[in-house]
Image (tube, rainbow, N blue to C red):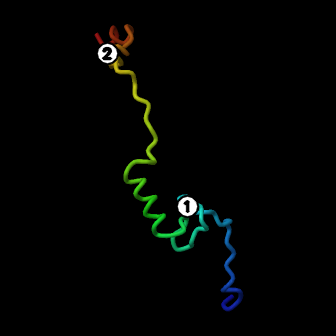
Amino acid sequence: MTGEGGGNVVKLRAPRPCPICTRKSAPEFHPFCSKHCADVDLNRWLKGAYAIPAVEPPDEWDEASQIRPDDDEAER
């Protein structure tokens, strides 16, 4: 087994462009093309630019108004 085709590595994925600037990605900064683009992405994460907005309940919602009459009698 040693010495047979050890230098031939088949890549399973097709190369994709850098998600920041769309240039060809570099293996050492995958999936980015450079350290600069990797740092730009990290900065966006740290600032919260990639956060998913949460749906807040209405202001008039409170826990007391959500108790059903049957629940209140069961507690007694």
Task: Decide: few, some or many residues near mark 2? Use Cα within 10 Å; few <14, some 14-19, many ≥20.
Answer: few
In the displayed structure, 65 sits above or below 32; it is: above
In the displayed structure, 51 sits above or below 65; it is: below
Disc on res. 64: 2
In the displayed structure, 25 sits above or below 47; it is: below
Where does the C terminus fall, quadrant-wise?
top left
Where does the N terminus fall, quadrant-wise?
bottom right
The picture places residue 36, in percent across and down from the top left corner, at 45, 67
User: Measuring 44% from the left and 31% from the top, which residue is drawn there?
Assistant: 55
User: Measuring 56% from the left and 58% from the top, which residue is drawn there?
Assistant: 19
Q: Which residue is mark 1?
A: 21
Q: Amino acid at mark 1?
A: Cys
Residues tagged 1 and 2 counted as in contact (Cβ below 8 A): no
Q: Place residue 10 in its image quadrant.
A: bottom right
Task: Decide: few, some or many residues near mark 1? Use Cα within 10 Å; few <14, some 14-19, many ≥20.
Answer: few
The picture places residue 75, in percent across and down from the top left corner, at 31, 13
Q: Amino acid at mark 2?
A: Ala
